[in-house]
Amino acid sequence: MSKAKVVLTARLNTKGFPFVNVTIRRNAIEQPVEIDGKIYSGESIQGFYVRYPHVVGNCLFPGCKGGVARHVQPLGKDHVDAHAQFQRIERDFTRVREGKPPIDEVKTPPEGRSIEEAARKFASVIENKQLKERSIESYLKSVEQFQAFCSSANVKTLDQITRGTILNFVGWMKKNLETRAGGSAQNTYRNKLKDVRVFLNEVGLGMPLKPRDWPKEVKARKEKYSTGSVKSMLAAADTYRRHDNCFWTPEDDKDLVHFLLKTGWRDDEIAHAQYSDINWCNSTVNVTAKPKGTFPGPKNSSARERDIVIDDALLKRLKVRQGRYAAKSNSLIFPSKAGKPNAHLIRVIQRLAKEAGVEGKIGLHKFRKTFATMVAREEGIEQARILLGHDEVETTQRYLAADEAAPEQDKAIVKKRFKDFGD
């Protein structure tokens, strides 16, 4: 008899969502999970899973129809409950391999399992997770579109979802989804498939379409704002003709541009930034946790490893801004008219860019890439990683844009390369 065994794993909430074996000590899952010197716990663990070979004739996997060599069964996120389930499966797997019946009866899931019902349960799970509002909207919208396709294709249950179903869904998206101007349709389809994969994993089905069969990713050119573009937007703050009911002044526009450019903060970090995040004595800022309930949808970003040093010009601007609005220490720096986190700051930048004639992709996040590129060029990519709050330097590398002008040595090389061809 081969040494087939039951293996307990954890799925990490990191790039690629890898499965890793967990350690069991003193009759419990060792917490936190440590892999290659890195610690994972809480939200960094997507869930626990058990893997075991298929047993012909008396398989332990609920609803097994054969045709597979190994099963991966979700056990949930609670490490105590996951270990108890693992022990029961390991015990019964050993009994079945010895020709004995399992002690716990294997319960077959309800026939078919309605996609509609599974989607409702998934929505409840996603909405209760500590995710950004935009991420929740993305998941729910993608699953809603997947449901619309399934309805048109007469696919009503999870058991009917196959590799062919997902391929047909891709074809449906090509005919029915509109992509934003300047965006890549291929990347849109990939993002939708990623969301659907999370849904299928949550309901215990898994994504039947292998990554090699997904639409190919189209990598966009990394962009940052040029020095000229930023100066033009700052100048446009004074020339833009505002509506009478617009509560933002030219100085408000300039404050936002300077803060975006010189901190590299994320969109939600900017929206929830408070004056208390500023260390006036040290001329630094840092992301800090906001007490839950202070504002609707408080940010959950982690503080940077090091404070971000800001120049005297921005520090002076922020001090003047606080005085202009008689703001308290716990007041938002860039609030909405109602005093809540402003979800429409991007419109300020879009308005300034249009007035200034700045072309290309416009957004708050592009300032973050501009900040990253400037820091990496002057202080190195590791410093950029720390100030951006990234865990992996690979993430930071994806932010770095090419300079608007080629280095002089590159120009000299090109000139020499083609000198024989004349003018």
Image (spheres, rainbow, N blue to C red):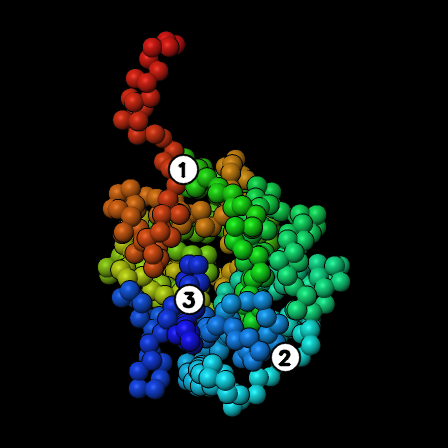
Left or right position of 335 against 31: right
**What residue is shown with label 1?**
226
Mark 1 vs mark 2, foreground winner is 2
Picture disc at residue 68? none
Residue type indicated by callout 1: Ser
Q: CA distance from mark 3 to mark 1?
A: 42 Å
Mark earlier in primary sequence (3, 1): 3
Picture disc at residue 19? 3
Labelled pair 3, 1 in contact (Cβ < 8 Å): no
Decide if residue 157 is in sight here.
Answer: yes
x and y percentages locating residue 197 in the rendered image = 56, 62
> Which residue is found at the position 51% from the left and 60% from the top?
342
Quadrant of the frame with the C terminus: top left
The one nearer the camera, 259 or 243, is: 259
**What residue is shown with label 2?**
109
- Toward which corner of the image does residue 275 lie, by quadrant? bottom left
Mark 3 vs mark 1, foreground winner is 3
> Which residue is found at the position 50% from the left and 87% from the top?
100
Left or right position of 280 against 371: left
Mark earlier in primary sequence (1, 2): 2
x and y percentages locating residue 167 in the rendered image = 64, 53
Q: CA distance from mark 1 to mark 2?
A: 58 Å
Residue type indicated by callout 3: Phe
Residue type indicated by callout 2: Pro
- Element class at badge 2: loop
x and y percentages locating residue 44 in the rendered image = 40, 69
- Toward which corner of the image does residue 156 lie, by quadrant? bottom right
- Element class at badge 1: loop
Q: CA distance from mark 2 to mark 3?
A: 25 Å
